Image: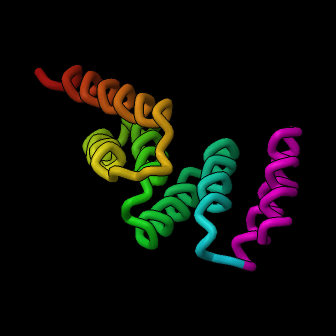
């Protein structure tokens, strides 16, 4: 799993996204619990415009690891991207709040600041919808 993750990371850095995705999928086939590969794969699917698969991957990570702040943050961002659809901003806010409540020691200070900024942006968007 580690070698596949490493190769996927190299391909991602070189912006060879199909090869990166292939390696992350292989890493997950070897170890379905390896959340870092799933998170990057979800980002690659967002980049490819496949929000449905990205959401499914992220929900699987949240189901397996409910305290993983990064997964909640990525879900919040995905839902914010779908702001024009009914209920998506409310779901984005819920996930941003979950990211901030997670108390995940793996969440870097910069990521926590990004989660707070995303939450503020979502609140502003929600306020803009009110008459």
Q: Which of 84 and 37 is in front in this view?
A: 37
Q: In which quadrant of the rendered view does residue 67 lie?
A: bottom left
Tell me if residue 88 can be seen. no
Which residue occupies 59% across, 74% down? Answer: 33
**Place of residue 125 in the rendered image (x, y in percent of width and height, measured from the top left):** 29, 25
Q: Where's the C terminus, which quadrant?
A: top left
Percent x, y of residue 10: 86, 48
Instruction: Determine whether, in the image, residue 23 is placed left or right of residue 111.
Output: right
Q: Is residue 5 magenta?
A: yes
Q: In which quarter of the image is residue 3?
A: bottom right
Image check: 61 left or right of 45?
left
In the image, is residue 116 above or below residue 98?
A: above
63 versus 48 height, above or below? below
Residue 122: x and y, percent?
Answer: 31, 30
Q: Which residue is drawn at 76% across and 70% down?
A: 27
Picture quadrant where residue 82 is located: top left
Magenta-colored span: 1-30
Residue 34 vs 67, above or below: the answer is below
């Amino acid at each position: 799993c580690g070698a596949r993750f490493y190769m996927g990371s190299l391909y991602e850095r070189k912006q060879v996204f199909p090869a990166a995705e292939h390696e992350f999928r292989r890493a997950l086939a070897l170890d379905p619990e390896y959340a870092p590969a799933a998170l990057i794969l979800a980002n690659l699917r967002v980049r490819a415009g496949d929000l449905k698969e990205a959401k499914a991957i992220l929900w699987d990570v949240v189901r397996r690891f409910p305290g993983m702040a990064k997964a909640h943050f990525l879900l919040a961002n995905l839902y914010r991207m779908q702001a024009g659809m009914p209920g998506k901003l409310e779901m984005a806010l819920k996930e941003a709040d979950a990211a901030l409540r997670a108390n995940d020691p793996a969440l870097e200070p910069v990521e926590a600041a990004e989660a707070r900024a995303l939450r503020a942006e979502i609140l502003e968007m929600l306020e803009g919808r009110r008459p």
